Amino acid sequence: MLKMSFDRPEDISMPEGQYRHVFNGKTMGTRYSAIIMSDDAQPPEGLEQALFEAVDRVDRQMSTWKANSDLMRLNRAKVGNWIEVPEDLFRVLKEAIAINRASSGLFDPAVGDMVDAWGFGASSREPDAEAIRAQLGQRRAPTYERLELDPARNTVRKKEEVTLDLCGIAKGYGVDVMADTLKAHGVKSGLVGIDGEMRAVGSKGSDMPWSVALEKPDHRLREALGMVHLRDAAIATSGDYRHWVKVGDRTFSHTMDPRSGGPLQNDVASVSVVADSCMTADAWATALMVMGAEAGLHVARAKGINALFLVRDGNKVREISAGPVFGSIS
């Protein structure tokens, strides 16, 4: 995961005549944060409320933890029925389907049944052995073949029963919505984030990039591996070390592999992706992690994706990168 590189006022040197404003709150089972640099001693009027409303709107539409969310309404819909959904949800579903197709199904927004079976979802906090046995080894068609979208009407139709879970893309979209909110309020310099997904608006000041810390993939400690520097770009990380479940003497991460019908099992500890939008970075970080280091690196380079793979090698972690952004992390 990533975190903002400064949490205390003394962690940032303020250019003369510049003011720093910080906003944060709860959303999506975690917290959102925004830091802006301004020439004004007071933040833009209404910005704090607008940021809250932006992330709350995404949460109300896409949460699997809210039974009345638009996503859960779609999950409950009968196969074959066209369901109208809000514009934000439609936009995320459209991108999720596009990356599902581009990743040969390895970014899968329809693994909600697996997430629930392994105790990571809202329905249960414990693995369900019977459901797990029913899913393991079962081949399923990619979601782009199971879901149909009509952009003219913002409607969605399930071609067969699916349980959608947008946890691998919705937080990234929430970050994009926060960035758009800053811009709508005239902010030209800001850094916004939800959990480990972040996006920089402009530069920090004096044309200096915003800096975020890349975490070491450690289950027990939170320690920085290095810094990544951003200007008008987003970053997201998918990792195996923050959300996991123990079954017997084995540990399984929350990332699901649609090829096996269960949790991902490979040597990739995390993948970080830098892209123009955080929604895109979020989904590709998951897709590349599921692919594994060798295949993921090939795909990232072929598609021009800036990605950093942290690969477990015994007690060590190796860094493998694609694209110029991660050529060196300081």
Image: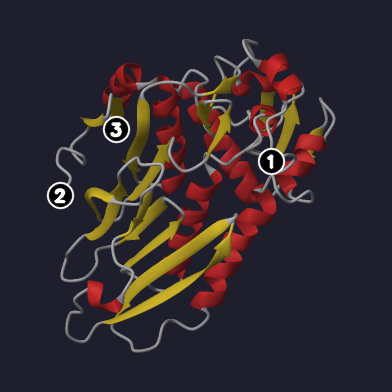
Identified by mark 3, the residue type is: Leu
Tell me which numbered mark, 1 or 3, is placed earlier along the sequence: 1
> Which residue position is annotated with label 3?
310
Residue 223 position within the rendered picture, expressed as x and y whole percent measured from the top left: 30, 51
Q: Residues within 10 Å of mark 2 (few under 14, many from 20)?
A: few
Viewer-proximal residue among 183 and 192: 192
Q: CB under 8 Å between callouts 1 and 2?
A: no
Tell me where residue 308 sits by quadrant: top left
Tag 2, which secondary structure? loop
Give the residue displayed 64% in from the left and 49% down from the top.
87
Tag 3, which secondary structure? strand
Q: Is residue 43 above or below residue 25?
A: below
- Mark nearest the camera among 1 and 2 is 1
Tag 1, which secondary structure? loop
Give the residue displayed 30% in from the left and 55% down from the top.
232
Tell me which numbered mark, 2 or 3, is placed earlier along the sequence: 3
Instruction: Determine the residue located farthest toward the bottom in the rendered image.
Output: 41
C-alpha distance separating marks 2 and 3: 15 Å
Tell me where residue 156 sits by quadrant: top right
C-alpha distance separating marks 1 and 2: 38 Å
Residue 327 position within the rendered picture, expressed as x and y whole percent measured from the top left: 15, 37
> Which residue position is annotated with label 1?
125
Residue 224 position within the rendered picture, expressed as x and y whole percent measured from the top left: 27, 51
Identified by mark 2, the residue type is: Ser
Residue 284 position within the rendered picture, expressed as x and y whole percent measured from the top left: 42, 33
Tell me which numbered mark, 1 or 2, is placed earlier along the sequence: 1
Q: Is residue 215 above or below residue 257?
A: below
> Which residue position is annotated with label 2?
330
Q: Residues within 10 Å of mark 1 (few under 14, many from 20)?
A: few
Give the residue displayed 48% in from the left and 70% down from the top.
24
Q: Is residue 179 something one can see in this rendering?
A: yes
